[in-house]
Image (cartoon, grey):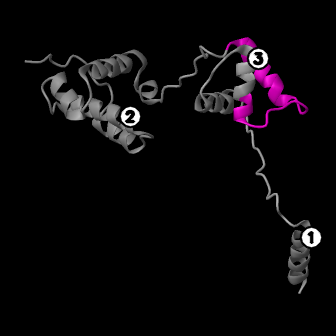
Amino acid sequence: MGRTRQTEIKESLSTLDSYKQKALNYKASKKLDLLLLISTDTYGTLEEIATHLSISIATLHRWLYKYRAVGINQYLSPEIRDRNSKLITPDIHRALADRLHDPEKSFNGFKDAQDWLKQEFGLDIEYQWLWKYMTTKLEAKLKVPRKTNVHKDEEASADFFKTTVSAEGH
């Protein structure tokens, strides 16, 4: 026999249904399903509800604790995880930002930034992790132009552009 429910849901079923229709993501939808199942007395125990929702009992308890502590609006809002990096110290962050905003010594790409960090600070960081850090925390957009063909005939491209311009004029 499982534990009986001890959480009282303050919102009415119609209010919960309206929140369900406006749910922005899957997790919020699951959290609302939990509140709806408790409100309707469909299941007798929390373990049965957790099994029905395919979540662990620990997750169910964490969600109910959060609902009781902060209310429905913060309960449904997505969690923002803005933690400081364990690898990038504030000094390294400033050095990266300075280098990004310096027009003379800017990076040629994320690989260049990765190599610079290894050379300057002895930091060996995965490319994907560095890319995510730089695009989210530093709002970097390192766009490297593609190389042109070495064997390209400059006169042929000039002739091509002359013909396209004259064709548009007619």
Examine the structure image and report whether residue 29 is included in the region drawn in magenta.
no
Residue indicated by mark 3:
120
Q: How many marks?
A: 3
Classify mark 3: helix, strand or loop.
helix
Classify mark 2: helix, strand or loop.
helix
> Magenta part of the protein: which range?
89-113
Quadrant occupied by the C terminus: bottom right
Identify the residue at horizontal 83%, vertical 32% (top origin).
Answer: 106
* Residue 84 placement (x, y as % from top left): 61, 16
Identify the residue at horizontal 74%, vertical 19% (top origin).
Answer: 119
Residue indicated by mark 1:
155
Q: Give the vertical position of 157 relative to 58 (above or below).
A: below
Mark closest to the chain's N terminus, 1 or 2: 2
Q: Nearer the viewer, residue 104 or 75?
A: 104
Examine the structure image and report whether residue 104 is included in the region drawn in magenta.
yes
In the image, taking residue 70 as reference, residue 86 lies left or right, namely right
Q: Are marks 3 and 2 in contact (CB under 8 Å)?
A: no
Instruction: Identify the disc placed on residue 27.
Output: 2
Q: Give the vertical position of 155 relative to 117 (above or below).
A: below
* Residue 93 placement (x, y as % from top left): 73, 18
Quadrant occupied by the N terminus: top left
Q: Amino acid at mark 2?
A: Lys
> Label 3 to label 2, Cα distance in Å?
42 Å
Classify 10 Å Cα crowding around label 1: few (below 14), some (14-19), many (20 and above): few
